[in-house]
Amino acid sequence: MKSFTIQQINEVLKGVLVGDTTQNISAPEQLELANSSEISFIGNKKYEKLWASSKACAAVVNEDIVIIPGENRAFIKVKNADLAMSQILALFSPPTPLFDVDIHPNAAVDLTAVVGKGSRIGAGAYIGPKVVLGENVTIYPNVTILDECTIGDNTVIWPGAVIRERCHLGKACIIHPNATIGADGFGFRPSAEHGLVKIPQIGNVIIGNNVEIGANSCVDRGKFSSTVLGDGCKIDNLVQIGHNSKLGPFCIMAGNSGLAGSVTLGTGVLIGGSASIKDHVTIGDGAIVGAGSGVTADIPAGKTMLGYPAVEARDALKQWAILKRLVRDSSK
């Protein structure tokens, strides 16, 4: 079991130590649940009031926190407690699942596949013809990677994920369980003779570096060319990205949100949970789409949109306030 002194933790964080504790720290935990051997976090002044009743022996806090830690308790003051928290979680992180051998004997690896130095492949995985795995790639059990895919160095693909043919993943990506990259886009056209005719989807998916895709999310292949996710995009669980959509760098999509086909997101766009974006819409750099919103038209850079259909946030809030007044007045 890992444990650290407060001084050892501060060597990692390089913050300002206020107070002291002789207690060895065994784990991080939220304020309300922490015990006397655990460290917690205060990232906002509104949580200062929880410190008095918390049993935590230490906390990482923002620089503007003014309370004092108390007897045999310590604070590490940092510029950003949330970012510091990520460092502490990494410090206490348990080891990842073990591989007894680099390539499990029950894995099926095509003779034409190239497996880079230090890469590992778990039981039941399938690596198809002409697949190229970079160095230090981790393929967990029961992953399927079909023909002519490339997987960049240090990428991790968790059990059950499927990477369909001719798709390309960059370096240091994380693909969570049962995500599907490169399934057919949703394309059908009515025909008097044949009913609904399937439109072939002959493109692929290209994913940049440091992209994370959550469990059970789907990124569909392009109808013509490529569906593209830029470097640093973070996709939550249960997200749908339609064919030929283009995501710029560092976009975030929260759970149950979805893009229809040929949507374009600029740099750093944030899509809230359960939001839906109509096909062929363009959303500019830094725009925010609130949770549950429905976007039916282009959004300029930097705008925040709310509602269904989505309008600028300030207009949506005014509309909701008017509706509340109407309801209140009608009940009198």
Image (cartoon, rainbow, N blue to C red):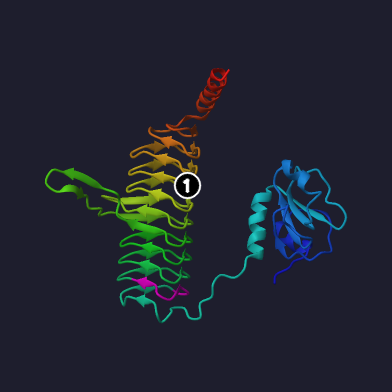
At x 41% / y 51%, what residue is drawn? 229
Q: Is residue 73 above or below residue 136?
A: above
> Looking at the image, which residue sits at the far right?
71
Q: Which residue is mark 1?
A: 253
The kind of residue on which mark 1 rests is Met
> Looking at the image, which residue sits at the far front?
332
Look at the numbered disc 1 and give the secondary structure of its residue: strand
Looking at the figure, which quarter contains the C terminus?
top right
Front-lying residue, 25 or 13: 25
Looking at the rendering, the stretch of residues picked out in magenta corresponds to 117-127
Where is residue 51? Give x, y as percent.
78, 49
Where is residue 116? Give x, y as percent.
42, 72
In magenta stretch: residue 190: no
At x 35% / y 76%, what residue is drawn? 109
At x 39% / y 54%, what residue is drawn? 218
Where is residue 249? Give x, y as percent.
46, 47
**Residue 280 vs residue 320: left or right?**
left
Q: Quadrant of residue 91?
A: bottom right
